Image: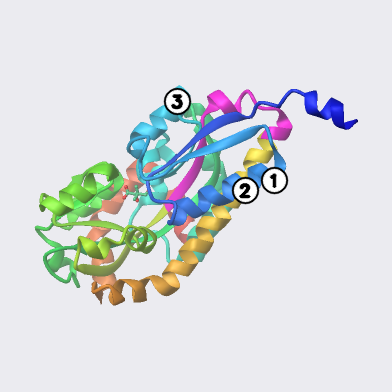
Amino acid sequence: MVAGAMAFAPAMAQTPLKMAYALSKDSHYGAGAKAFVESLGANNKDFVIEEFPNSALGGEREVIEGLQLGTVDVAIVSTGATLNFVPQTGALDIPFLFADLDHARGVLDGEIGQGMLEKFPEHGLVALAWGEQGFRHLTNSKRPVENPDDIKGLKIRITENPIHLKAFRELDVLATPMAWPEVSTALQQGTIDGQENPLSVIVSTKMWQLQPYLSMTGHVYAPALVLMSPAVYDSLSAEDKAGFAEAGKAASKAMRAYVDQVEKEGLETLKANGMKVNDVDYAAFEAAVQPVYPQYYDQFGQELIESIRKAK
Ligand code: PAF
């Protein structure tokens, strides 16, 4: 093409897409979003992703509703939120189910996890890939929690997740389901004593500014998901769909890398900032929530739960 023709060539319009997530750009979700944007940009110049971090488009429940309605295009969310839309994902939220990160990643990357991703379109959503947060631990403002007796009576914010709620009630915790955007104010005002999240969240939100105690309960693995609105996805060419799937995988890889890093170095950061960190009697916590397992078996099937547990 000659230079003159180039000058008059019409500019190709890029389609803007809104990507929502609950945490800052400097978090595992931010790392996932960055990798998503880079992967997509390398393969496809037709789309431009506009990031909305820090719950700028609302809590995770609202964001998922936005994906269904087509007002949000892409999102990274936790399964605490998806289970109210795609009930099967709740099986992964059962406390003390996974032994370690490798175990969880193996299940998500295997038949069970990939099969769950395929269920999303039945619920008006597209799941591109599993992301990750890590294992959840407890923070609070009252005392070090080392065994199940210490946690009794604490008012702890949990996600809007009935699977977690059952286990915390069994531990006699005053469990308070609450959307994430309300948590920091509730902690500041003392309407709740604590919250539980993985190191990825505790470090990236500088939780030491609000909570003095961190107890390494590791009570449940927290997957995340890269979701898309069918309103966008269904209109894509096969080639573009492959590009978005690739971007989802890149986001997942980046989130896992962030989690690996924060699991290695996060505790030092928290201690250096004055947080009092303690180990817990893990076996005692695990035993204390066992009475809830029959309810989980009724809900998800004992066979599925046992096959997740054994898939090591
Ligand atoms: O605790 C939660 O609600 C979630 O773990 C969070 C922090 C919003 C990330 O998905």
Rendered-image quadrant of the N terminus: top right
Badge 1 marks a residue whose secondary structure is: helix
Residue 245 sits in quarter? top right
Magenta-tinted stretch: 223-240
Number of disc labels: 3
Q: Which residue is mark 1?
A: 42
Residue 138 sits in quarter? bottom left
User: Badge 2 local density, few (<14 within 10 Å), some, or many (20+)?
Assistant: some
- Residue 218 shown in magenta: no
Label 2, label 1: how many angstroms apart (C-alpha)?
A: 6 Å
In depth, the one of 289 and 276 nearer the eye is 276
Badge 3 marks a residue whose secondary structure is: loop
The three-letter code of the residue at mark 3 reads: Thr
In depth, the one of 193 and 107 nearer the eye is 193
Q: Which residue is mark 3?
A: 71
Q: Which mark is residue 38?
A: 2
